[in-house]
Image: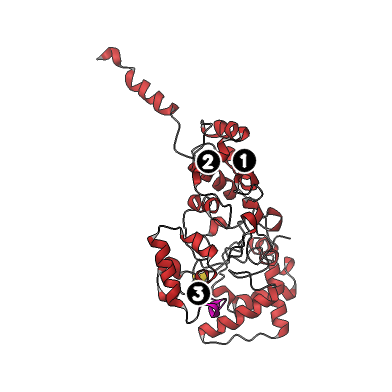
């Protein structure tokens, strides 16, 4: 047996040479590919729409629309959230229907109101048909024919490496220079945010500024009047979709009434009807319009709406003067990259 001493070493070398699982290439190389995939309209069903259509880097990765518009001009039901704080998100999408970012980034490709393909294989075929992608994937993962998992991994690598930038409030809090970097009006707004206005009860503050969310789901009264008294038919539509194996994301973006059920679509808990994920307030001044359906056009209007419903649901009315609302808005603007 001694003459075969080299056999285990050979097995080890062969194992090291094998291609790893989907997306196991160098993160930097995958991120470079992901940036191109994100902005490439050739990967949509109409050849004119990309991820960046709804998540524009110039608009803090939003689109400034009330609800996003996908392939063939099809409008969805959701306001596009910024992608700059994905590292803070425990649940993705407004109703938290996905927790795995690698799965979430692939879903728009097969949603009829987003990128519109019939299945992921169509996306894979489109990527494989483009020589530059074949070359880049060959360098990144050792295979010129990427699978869906490789495409997802590249998009995740890109999103996780986005430059979040630094806000004035974050710098002030990090350096202990609130008095120097924030005006008197902005500091008064911070005191209101953390106290009388009760904002921090949901939009929590950390040691370094963020994440400005409690990762939970709350009611804000937005859109609920559209479905009040009409729940039974909506529950039937959800049940039918589940029985048919249809992705919930497709139903939510195509059915405006189902979309208003919020977290309930995921949890099935009656208390979650009309509850939506607390969004981060980072870049809030740069990401109007607001709420899950984009129905609130300005920051000032969002403040008024939030104060009213916060008092309504807690049973403790929140009353701010006009000056205090102005101070609160001034503070909120320090949470955006300038």
**Residue 3, magenta (yes or no):** no
Disc tally is 3
Pinpoint residue 289: horizontal percent, then vertical percent.
Answer: 67, 68
Q: Residue 124 carries which label?
A: 2
Q: Mark 1 points at which residue?
A: 32
SS class of the residue under badge 2? helix
Q: Around disc 3, counting alpha carbons within 10 Å, would you say few (fewer than 14), some (14 to 19), or many (20 or more)?
A: many
Nearer mark to the viewer, of 1 and 2: 2
| Left or right for 199, reference 19 | right
Q: What stretch is highlighted in magenta?
A: 219-227
Q: Mark 3 points at which residue?
A: 274
Q: State the quadrant of the N terminus.
A: top left
Q: What residue lies at 53% left-to-right and 61% top-to-bottom?
A: 93
Among all residues in the image, which is located at the extreme left? 1
Q: Residue 322 carries which label?
A: none
Q: Which of 120 and 329 is in front in this view?
A: 120
SS class of the residue under badge 3? loop
């Amino acid at each position: 047996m001694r003459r075969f001493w080299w056999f285990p070493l050979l097995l080890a070398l062969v194992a090291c040479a094998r291609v790893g699982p989907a997306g196991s290439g160098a993160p930097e190389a995958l991120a470079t590919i992901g940036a191109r995939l994100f902005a490439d309209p050739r990967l949509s069903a109409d050849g004119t729409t990309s991820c960046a259509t709804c998540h524009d880097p110039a608009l803090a990765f939003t689109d400034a629309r009330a609800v996003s518009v996908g392939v063939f001009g099809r409008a969805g039901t959701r306001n596009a959230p910024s992608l700059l704080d994905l590292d803070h998100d425990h649940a993705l999408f407004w109703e938290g229907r996905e927790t795995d970012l690698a799965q979430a980034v692939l879903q728009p490709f097969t949603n009829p109101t987003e990128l519109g393909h019939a299945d992921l294989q169509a996306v894979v075929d489109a990527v494989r048909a483009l020589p530059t992608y074949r070359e880049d994937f060959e360098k990144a993962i050792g295979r010129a024919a990427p699978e869906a998992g490789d495409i997802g991994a590249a998009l995740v690598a890109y999103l996780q490496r986005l430059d979040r930038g630094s806000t004035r409030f974050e710098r002030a809090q990090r350096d202990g220079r609130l008095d120097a970097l924030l005006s008197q009006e902005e500091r008064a707004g911070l005191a209101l945010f953390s106290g009388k206005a009760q904002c921090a009860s949901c939009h929590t503050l950390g040691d370094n500024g963020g994440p400005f969310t409690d990762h939970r789901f709350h009611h804000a009264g937005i859109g609920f009047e559209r479905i009040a008294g009409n729940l039974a038919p909506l529950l039937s539509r959800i049940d039918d979709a589940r029985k048919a194996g249809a992705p919930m994301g497709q139903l939510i973006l195509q059915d405006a009434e189902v979309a208003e059920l919020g977290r309930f679509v995921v949890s099935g808990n009656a208390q979650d009807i009309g509850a939506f994920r607390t969004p981060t307030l980072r870049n809030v001044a740069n990401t109007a319009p607001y709420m899950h359906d984009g129905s609130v056009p300005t920051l000032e209007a969002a403040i008024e709406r939030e104060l009213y419903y916060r008092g309504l649901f807690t049973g403790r009315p929140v009353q701010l003067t006009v000056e205090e609302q102005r101070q609160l808005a001034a503070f909120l603007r320090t949470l955006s990259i300038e």
